[in-house]
Amino acid sequence: MIFDPMYLIVVGPAILLALWAQGMVKSAFGKMSRVAVRSGVTGAQAAAQILQRHGLNHVGIELAQGMLSDHYDPRHKVLRLSPDVYHGRSIAAVGVAAHEAGHALQDDSGYAPLKLRNGIVPLASVGSNLSWVLVMLGLFMSFSGLIWAGIILFSAVVVFQLINLPVEFNASRRAREVLMQTGIVSGQEDAAVGKVLNAAAMTYVAATLTAVLTLIYYLLRAQGSRN
Ligand SMILES: [Zn+2]
């Protein structure tokens, strides 16, 4: 991208927040993956217990590759857990596994924000790849139609990030509730699980702020190109 000081001024605070949040996640995961959960279950076992308790026996649990690659795949009804989470018997492993199981519970209960989020994924991924090219090309050629096409496409990214926030916070809330109900986690351990999941949530807040500020930056540039 062409270097523009205005970009750093407008979006810079969000970039700083994102870096800070990444540090928080690393530190929380590092600490809490060394703290064993007293019930002694692995992340995979915790996820299985949560799914069983809610009658979701059709949801699979698979071992995925790569660190922090954990996710729930709503299309194939599968939880994919990274090796550390799948095999781990720590607060961090059980917390992350339960969070992903929380997404499966959302899917099962027809939680509307999850449906909305999944619906906008294709448009948002096109938007995040193509929008800045259109905006930059539009600015370069002084063609406002291209700039606005890029801005409209990028709006899908902003909408995705905004809907993603309640989805992620809700999955973590469900995770903590069900971890206590099943006895996988005891009273004092819940606060430690909260630390891990709240740190992860901060990265989503940072991503949302980055998207909103980038949209504002595009709007400012579009405005500037008109004068
Ligand atoms: Zn999540």
Image: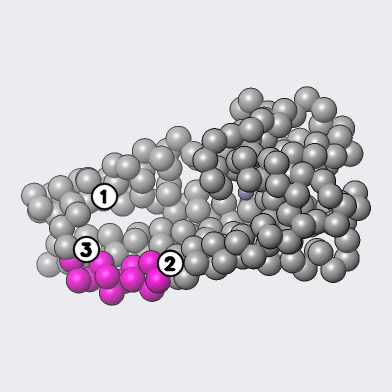
**Residue that carries the numbered disc 3 in the rendered image:** 221
Would residue 84 be found to the left or right of residue 18 on screen?
right
Q: Are marks 3 and 2 in contact (CB under 8 Å)?
A: no
Q: Residue at x 60, y 41 (%)?
A: 82
Where on the picture, by quarter, is residue 108? top right
Q: Nearer the viewer, residue 182 or 165?
A: 182
Span shown in magenta: 4-16
Horizontal and vertical percent position of residue 90 = 73, 54
For badge 3, the amino acid type reads Arg
Q: Is residue 9 magenta?
A: yes
Check residue 23 for magenta coloring.
Answer: no
Residue 207 appears anywhere in the view: yes
Labels 2 & 1 near each other (Cβ < 8 A): no
Rendering coords of residue 200 (x, y %)? 59, 59
Helix, strand or loop: magenta stretch: helix
Q: Which mark is residue 11?
A: none
Q: Nearer the viewer, mark 1 or mark 3?
A: 1
Residue wearing tag 1: 132
